[in-house]
Amino acid sequence: METKTGSAQGAVDGYLMADFPWYGLDEAFTGRRWLHTVGASGDGTVEYGSIGHGDEPTLKADPADETLRFTVVMTVAQRPGRRTADGTGLLEATSVSSAAWLAGSGLLACTWPTTMERALRQDWLDQQTATAWELADDLDGSGWAALTLPVDGEPTPFHYRESEYGWVLAGSARGVHLGAFGRGMSAYGLALAAIPDIRAYDGA
């Protein structure tokens, strides 16, 4: 089971416990940067996390607000398949699909239509979540396009898709899988880089 830490004052502690580098937009982005979420396995090992750039999306904001501009970069540790800490189960190996799923579900979580009737919300969320999973599991399918972006200055291939809610991309770098989602900021002009000091981000 995974636990998540939000962008509260002490959230940086979870990021500092990771045994892999965190990635965000490179220094060409001069806007606000903020801590988003960290995910850890049952034994406390940090498995993934995300860093936000620009506006901080919340469900209090109108998903249709065209002025909302943000990019969230997901970093997922490259892990082989392994046993859980208590030895009773197995954890699947992480992959680019893992990053794609986290990015897709992250976009869904902050852009779903809060004005929808309560009776319809769960059905809509279930349907969209299943679609996001199916897309993440078929990265070579027609739902994705190819996009090359700089990562630490090196051209890096990504899988990319757009929807009415925003865009999602996923790929790999040295020792990690990378995902990202956003809206109001074009993915085509982005560049990613390892973060020298995560404590410099808001909330640290």
Image: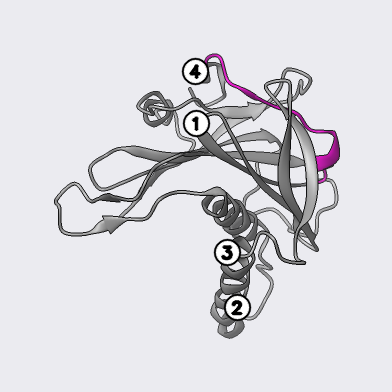
Q: Amino acid under label 2?
A: Gln
The type of colouring in the image is one colour
Q: Residue furthest bottom?
A: 119
Q: Residue at x 62, y 57 (%)?
A: 104
Mark 1 surroundings: few (<14), some (14-19) or many (≥20) residues within 10 A: few
Q: Amino acid under label 4?
A: Arg
Calculate the distance from the C-alpha at mark 2 to the C-alpha at mark 3: 16 Å
Q: Is residue 172 left or right of residue 187?
A: left
Q: Nearer the viewer, residue 122 or 60?
A: 122
Q: Amino acid under label 3?
A: Asp
Mark before the other along the chain sequence, 2 or 3: 2
Q: Which residues are magenta?
A: 184-197
**Residue 8: horizontal and vertical position, in percent?**
45, 34
Calculate the distance from the C-alpha at mark 3 to the C-alpha at mark 1: 21 Å
Q: Which residue is mark 1?
A: 175
Considering only vertical position in the picture, is 103 above or below 120? above
Name the front one of labels 4 and 3: 3
**Residue 131: horizontal and vertical position, in percent?**
63, 72
Is there a contact, CB below 8 Å, between mark 4 and mark 3?
no
Identify the disc placed on residue 127. 2
Calculate the distance from the C-alpha at mark 1 to the C-alpha at mark 4: 21 Å
Q: Which residue is mark 3?
A: 137
